[in-house]
Image (cartoon, coloured by chain):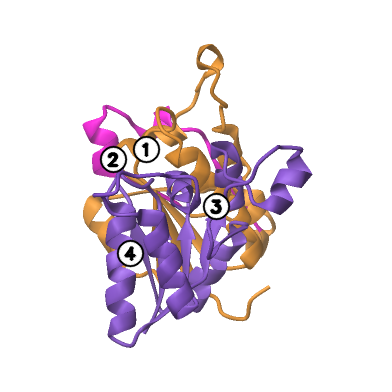
Chain colours: A purple, B orange
């Protein structure tokens, strides 16, 4: 089965990104395919590499980046949602004339079309959010 | 743009303001329209408030995006399912909602209502009939 995953809530405030992570990990372990993980609304905040959670807590961004590296996952952050919330890659930093960028390893910024495309290509699309 | 045509349902469950869900859901609908899929929208719970007429956000500084719903017909988004029970529970009737229409190209471009009021039970059937459900 090929899954498409949507993460709609921000890290730590909400358990959605944890549940999505656990689901993806379990699905891959069972031999399923994950076409893409699309981060939307506050979910885009999962992809900042500048978060510094306490050491005795889970490292949500690092968990995703490691999983992406291991399995070649496509982690997509919605550009419109990201720009509102201050998440920029190097390209967008230059285009918007900002002085920093903060996208973590394994994540990429792209458009909402990637969400629709995922829905078309995946056998099942699963939303994690409120 | 794509050879596969799937049934997409966008489920709107939240009030139009207070949180960004409704506004960003509408952005997905508008982008998604370019993919030539079979698109429907569902409005239930506080989501039914998204379609009310006379929205005025001036004093809040928030963007009033409600006129965009009337333009959905131009994007060939013509099925807006609204749950009757959700309206009832909030003291709303069809008269409280915007008059949203589309031009039916198969019927000499006659103007037809996009809003379809359905029971909670029927909404369940609408959902069961979809390929992809995105919930906001």
A70 and A46: which is toward the camera: A70
Residue at the image point whose x is 58% and y is 48% from the top: A102
Q: Residue shown at 27%/66% (left/top)? A: A22
Name which quarter of the figure residue B17 lies in.
Answer: top left
* First to last magenta residue range: B80-104
Disc assigned to residue A21? 4
Gap in Å between the C-alphas at discs 2 and 3? 20 Å
Q: Residue at the bottom extreme?
A: A31
Where in the figure is residue B76, as x and y percent of width and height?
62, 57
Task: Say whether residue B87 is left or right of residue B24.
Answer: left
Q: Secondary structure at mark 1?
A: helix
The residue singled out by tag 2 in the image is B45
- Residues at discs 2 and 3 both on one chain: yes
The image position of residue B37, as x and y in percent, is 56, 68
Q: CA distance from mark 3 to mark 4?
A: 23 Å
Q: Say which residue label 3 marks.
A: B28
**Splitting the image into 4 quarters, where does residue B4 fall?**
bottom right
State the CA–CA distance, disc 2 to disc 1.
Answer: 6 Å
Q: Are the residues flagged by discs 2 and 1 in contact, CB closer than 8 Å?
A: yes
Precedes in sequence: disc 3 or disc 1: 3
Q: Secondary structure at mark 4?
A: helix
| Quadrant where the N terminus of chain B is found in the figure | bottom right
Q: Mark on residue B48? A: 1
Proximity of marks 3 and 1: CB atoms separated by less than 8 Å: no
| Front position in the image: B34 or B79 | B34
Q: Nearer the viewer, mark 1 or mark 4?
A: 4
Label 3 vs label 4, nearer the camera: 4
Kindly report the distance in space between the C-alpha atoms of the residues bearing marks 1 and 4. 32 Å
**Magenta-colored stretch includes residue B82:** yes
- Residue B90 horizontal/vertical position (percent): 26, 29
Mark 3 burial class by Cα count in 10 Å: few <14, some 14-19, many 20+: some
**Chain for mark 1?**
B
């Amino acid at each position: 089965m090929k899954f498409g995953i949507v993460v709609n809530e921000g890290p730590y405030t909400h358990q959605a990104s944890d549940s999505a992570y656990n689901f993806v990990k379990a699905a891959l372990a069972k031999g399923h395919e994950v076409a893409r993980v699309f981060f939307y609304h506050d979910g885009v905040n999962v992809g900042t590499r500048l978060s510094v959670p306490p050491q005795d807590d889970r490292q949500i961004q690092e968990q995703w980046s490691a999983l992406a590296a291991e399995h070649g996952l496509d982690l997509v952050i919605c550009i419109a949602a990201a720009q509102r919330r201050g998440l920029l890659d190097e390209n967008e930093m230059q285009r918007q004339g900002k002085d920093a960028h903060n996208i973590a390893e394994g994540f990429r910024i792209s458009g909402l079309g990637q969400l629709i495309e995922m829905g078309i290509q995946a056998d099942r699309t699963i939303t994690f959010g409120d | 743009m794509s050879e596969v045509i799937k049934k997409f349902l966008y489920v709107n469950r939240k009030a139009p303001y207070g949180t960004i869900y409704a506004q960003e859901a509408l952005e997905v609908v508008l982008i998604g329209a370019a993919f030539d899929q079979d698109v429907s929208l569902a409005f239930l719970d506080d989501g039914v408030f998204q379609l009310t007429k006379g929205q005025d956000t001036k004093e809040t500084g928030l963007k009033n995006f409600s006129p965009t719903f009337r333009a959905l017909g131009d994007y060939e988004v013509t099925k807006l399912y609204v749950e009757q029970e959700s309206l009832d529970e909030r003291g709303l009737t069809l008269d409280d909602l915007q008059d949203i229409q589309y031009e039916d190209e198969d019927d000499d471009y006659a103007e037809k209502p996009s809003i379809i009021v359905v029971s909670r039970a029927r909404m369940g059937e609408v959902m069961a009939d979809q390929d992809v459900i995105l919930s906001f």
